[in-house]
């Protein structure tokens, strides 16, 4: 009720009632001039989409915290099998970390290119991001294959189950992210910078940066602490 | 074009990860990402190299690594996700704070409870000794 009244008020020139624009500090969201104290009506679709996706990412991180908790609890339960000290190869982890950090950077450059509405550079940076992501995934799969071949698969001990669940879940996210990236490149190619494509690119960028944040926790807690340096 | 105009209108509210909203922000664009990359690389290199050098007192190494990781997450949030630099993104921050609370409860709570249970639990060897 009051919202509709405020809207009518706004259309009749709210400046008259509010000469110092106390309620208009924001200049309004959306299509209407704002009325009321800093409300300004519903935010734009871009803001709402970004916020919703941010909440999804946080819930994803909460899910990861469950895997981290399981790993932290089970890290010592090697059941006489190999532990982190024998299994982890830090040089490979360092390369994986560098690849993912660089891909996060190029993803950011892609968003800058998007901001400048350059399809060419956005595609280039997305492509580089994807290549770095694939390289990361190849290294991780190599590591897993090597461990399984040495008889240190997920069924060997509780520690290894937790390890494969946590790191594998992150790897799965990277794989899904790469598929999404390919889809975004195709959509950008066919549809250009439409408003909905811009929103999806925003969400993809958020997703990719969040993966890197989770990897920071993985390489610290699993690999660096696990190898007992 | 209308979308661009709408973005301009949202100057005081921002989506997480949004780049174009805060035009007055000093660390936007390529420069912000470059600084973020440099800081994150520095912290990563420190985390990988420092423990091997003996510069840190050995029992403090896990704490040092955790501090480096949290610092790097902060760098990512500020420079890559632009989560703290908007002029009115309280909603994003509050959601983040809630997420951090839940993560802390889940991880610290699990570790605390399970360690406690491990203390209470007798190993089979202990059990045999008690029964003798």
Image (tube, coloured by chain):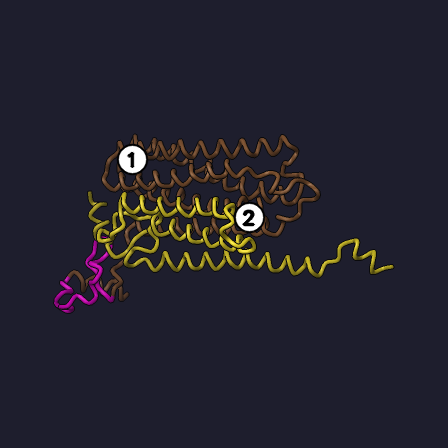
Chain colours: A brown, B yellow
Q: Main secondary structure of the magenta part?
A: loop
Using the rendered view, name the quadrant where residue A42 is placed: bottom left
Q: Residue at x 30, y 40 (%)?
A: A109
**Dot 2, how many residues are within 10 Å of its Cα: few (below 14), some (14-19), or many (20+)?**
some
| Residue range corresponding to the magenta coloring | A12-37
Q: Is residue B77 in view from this perspective?
A: yes
Q: Chain of mark 1?
A: A
Percent position of residue A229, x then y: 55, 46
Percent position of residue A163, x then y: 58, 43
Q: Chain of mark 2?
A: A
Q: Vertically, is B20 above or below B98? A: above
Query: Mark 1 sits on what residue?
Result: A122
Query: Mark 2 sits on what residue?
Result: A225
Was residue A40 drawn as part of the magenta stretch in this picture?
A: no
| Nearer-N-terminus badge (2/1) | 1
Say which element carries label 2: helix
Circle 2/circle 1 CB separation < 8 Å: no
Q: Residue at x 12, y 67 (%)?
A: A16
Q: Is residue A49 in view from this perspective?
A: no
Do circles 2 and 1 both sit on a common chain? yes
Q: Vertically, is A141 above or below B20? A: above
In the image shown, does A208 or B7 lie closer to the viewer? Answer: A208
Using the rendered view, name the quadrant where residue A89 is placed: top right
Percent position of residue B83, x then y: 35, 53
In this rendering, would A227 be left or right of A21?
Answer: right
Query: Which-is-in-front pick, marks 2 and 1?
Result: 2
Say which element carries label 1: helix
């Amino acid at each position: 009720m009051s919202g509709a009244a405020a809207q009518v008020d706004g259309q009749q020139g709210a400046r008259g009632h509010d000469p110092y624009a106390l309620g208009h500090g924001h200049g309004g969201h959306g299509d209407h001039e704002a009325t009321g104290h800093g409300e300004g009506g519903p935010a734009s679709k871009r803001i709402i989409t970004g916020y919703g996706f941010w909440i999804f990412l946080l819930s994803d991180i909460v899910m990861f915290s469950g895997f981290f908790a399981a790993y932290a609890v089970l890290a010592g339960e090697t059941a006489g099998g190999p532990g982190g000290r024998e299994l982890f190869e830090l040089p490979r982890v360092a390369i994986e970390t560098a690849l993912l950090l660089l891909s996060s950077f190029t993803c950011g450059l892609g968003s800058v290119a998007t901001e400048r509405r350059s399809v060419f550079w956005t595609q280039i940076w997305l492509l580089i991001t994807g290549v770095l992501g694939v390289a990361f995934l190849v290294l991780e799969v190599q590591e897993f294959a090597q461990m399984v071949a040495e008889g240190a698969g997920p069924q060997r001990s509780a520690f290894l189950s937790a390890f494969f669940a946590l790191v594998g879940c992150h790897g799965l996210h990277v794989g899904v992210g790469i598929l999404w990236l390919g889809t975004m490149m195709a959509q950008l190619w066919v549809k250009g910078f439409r408003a909905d494509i811009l929103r999806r690119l925003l969400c993809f960028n958020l997703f990719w940066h969040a993966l890197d944040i989770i990897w920071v926790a993985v390489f610290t807690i699993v690999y660096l602490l696990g190898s007992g340096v | 074009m209308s979308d661009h105009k709408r973005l301009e209108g949202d100057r005081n509210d921002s989506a997480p990860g949004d780049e174009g909203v805060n035009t007055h922000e000093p660390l936007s664009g390529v420069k912000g990402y470059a600084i973020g990359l440099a800081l994150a690389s520095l912290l990563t290199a420190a985390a990988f190299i420092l423990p091997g050098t003996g510069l840190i007192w050995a029992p403090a190494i896990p704490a040092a690594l955790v501090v480096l990781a949290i610092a790097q997450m902060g760098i990512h949030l500020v420079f890559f996700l632009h989560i703290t630099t908007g002029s009115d993104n309280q909603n994003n921050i509050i959601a983040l704070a809630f997420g951090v609370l839940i993560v802390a409860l889940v991880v610290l709570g699990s570790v605390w409870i399970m360690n406690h249970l491990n203390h209470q639990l007798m190993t089979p060897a202990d059990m045999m000794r008690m029964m003798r």
